[in-house]
Image (cartoon, helix red, strand yellow):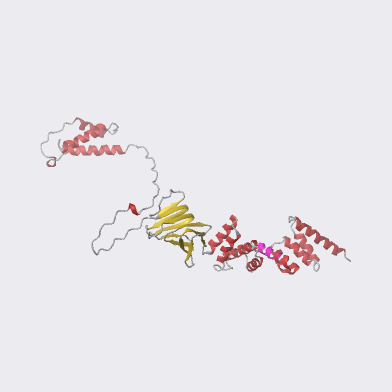
């Protein structure tokens, strides 16, 4: 059978297998092909115009077009393959190069997204094991892998003496290691590095590089005031130990001016944390710095703290601070303390202050108010 005969026969077979043609012209072409007798070969196909070959090709094209218009069932979505990180063993062996030729640089593999919702790889790179609960990105090369860690806990185990220099980078720190086991935990706008084997080099942002040895930890804090304030607020809301808040506040002292909004808020948090820690003298000093500022939202809170603390220490010698507290928070128990102090010299002011004391104050303050009223009545009864 010649090539032409084979092509015509293929077109016939295609049309014979088609049972769902609807176009009349296409059906007529099909019938013509099926009933047409094959002409005997006279000369090679390339020496003739080949009308039947052209008809067969046109018919085949028409059949393909008509088949493509038919509705097809939706292909189910394919489940993406788990993300696997590259390995040196998966790369092709290097090709030999001519003498004097510069070695061709090995391209770095594309970054790999790391997240708790994705299936973790058993081995992130050769000689490196990663265990993580959080989010980050794996980049770099097999000899110098780099993890850009965003949040959560990352466990790293690097086999020593394999010339692998791994780096973990967070917004607050950069950790570099040759061979060890350590954890990096990022939460509340801070990074904690804990070493369980070997030692690591850690450079907190804006700080010199230090070495953290086995069994030790290092906390790297943010360097921008807004992140520091967010961290302190989050720690307070979580009920974290006061010492952790004080470490952050101490770190922020020289990074922001008191007069700024963020600086004032940090001062207010600092005074409150010092008071909770029982460091009253330091708390009073920080609170006075805060009250020297203007238009700060915690003035009433800190003014009453200073007034009550000084009254407990100095008695009525703390009258100026009591007056300031009453001005910031009228009707507070400090009004009653001031009334006791001014009663001998200004009973009218003491009476007005008693009227301002809120009725919902604690029972101990109500009893104290009754004693002051009794003293006022006794003064009025005197001739």
Q: Quadrant of the N terminus?
A: top left
Q: Nearer the viewer, residue 373 or 19?
A: 373
Vertically, is 8 above or below 147? above
Q: Nearer the viewer, residue 96 or 150?
A: 96
Instruction: Give the quadrant of residue 239.
Output: bottom right
Q: Residue furthest top?
A: 35
On screen, residue 361 above or below 16: below
Instruction: Answer above or below: position of 291 versus 109.
Output: below
Picture residue at 47% right of the left edge, 55% below the top: 154
Residue 29 seen in this snapshot: no
- Principal secondary structure, stretch drawn in magenta: helix
Where residue 220 sits in the image (x, y, percent)?
A: 51, 62
Q: Is residue 162 magenta?
A: no
List x then y, in percent, for residue 39: 14, 33
Residue 6 appears in view = yes
Hey, which residue is sitting farthest left in the picture?
A: 42
Magenta span of residues: 300-307
């Amino acid at each position: 059978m010649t090539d032409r005969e084979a092509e015509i026969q293929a077109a016939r077979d295609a049309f014979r297998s088609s049972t769902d043609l609807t176009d009349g012209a296409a059906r007529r072409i099909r019938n013509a092909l099926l009933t047409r007798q094959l002409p005997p070969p006279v000369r090679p196909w390339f020496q003739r115009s080949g009308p039947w070959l052209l008809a067969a090709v046109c018919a085949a094209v028409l059949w393909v077009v008509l088949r493509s218009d038919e509705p097809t069932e939706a292909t189910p979505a394919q489940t993406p393959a788990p993300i696997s990180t590259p390995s040196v063993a998966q790369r092709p062996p290097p090709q030999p190069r001519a003498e004097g030729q510069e070695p061709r640089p090995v391209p770095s593999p594309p970054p790999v997204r790391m997240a708790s919702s994705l299936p973790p790889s058993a081995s992130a790179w050769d000689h490196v094991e990663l265990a993580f609960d959080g989010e980050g990105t794996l980049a770099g090369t097999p000899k110098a892998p780099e993890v850009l860690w965003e949040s959560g806990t990352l466990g790293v185990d690097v086999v020593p003496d394999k010339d692998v220099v791994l780096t973990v980078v967070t917004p607050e720190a950069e950790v570099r290691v040759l061979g060890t086991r350590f954890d990096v935990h990022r939460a509340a706008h801070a990074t904690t590095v804990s070493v369980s084997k070997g030692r690591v080099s850690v450079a907190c942002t804006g700080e010199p590089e230090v070495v953290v040895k086995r069994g030790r930890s290092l906390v790297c804090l943010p360097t921008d005031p807004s992140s520091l304030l967010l961290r302190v607020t989050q720690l307070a809301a979580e009920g974290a130990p006061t010492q952790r808040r004080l470490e952050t506040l101490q770190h922020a002292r020289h990074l922001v001016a008191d007069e700024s909004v963020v600086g004032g808020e940090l001062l207010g948090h600092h005074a409150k944390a010092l008071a909770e820690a029982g460091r009253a003298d330091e708390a009073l000093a920080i609170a006075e710095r805060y009250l020297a500022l203007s238009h700060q939202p915690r003035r009433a809170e800190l003014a009453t703290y200073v007034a009550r603390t000084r009254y407990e220490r100095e008695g009525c010698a703390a009258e100026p601070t009591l007056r300031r507290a009453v001005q910031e928070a009228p009707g507070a128990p400090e009004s009653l303390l001031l009334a006791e102090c001014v009663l001998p010299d200004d009973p009218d002011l003491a009476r007005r202050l008693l009227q301002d004391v809120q009725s919902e104050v604690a029972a101990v303050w109500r009893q104290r108010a009754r004693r002051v009223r009794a003293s006022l009545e006794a003064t009025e009864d005197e001739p």
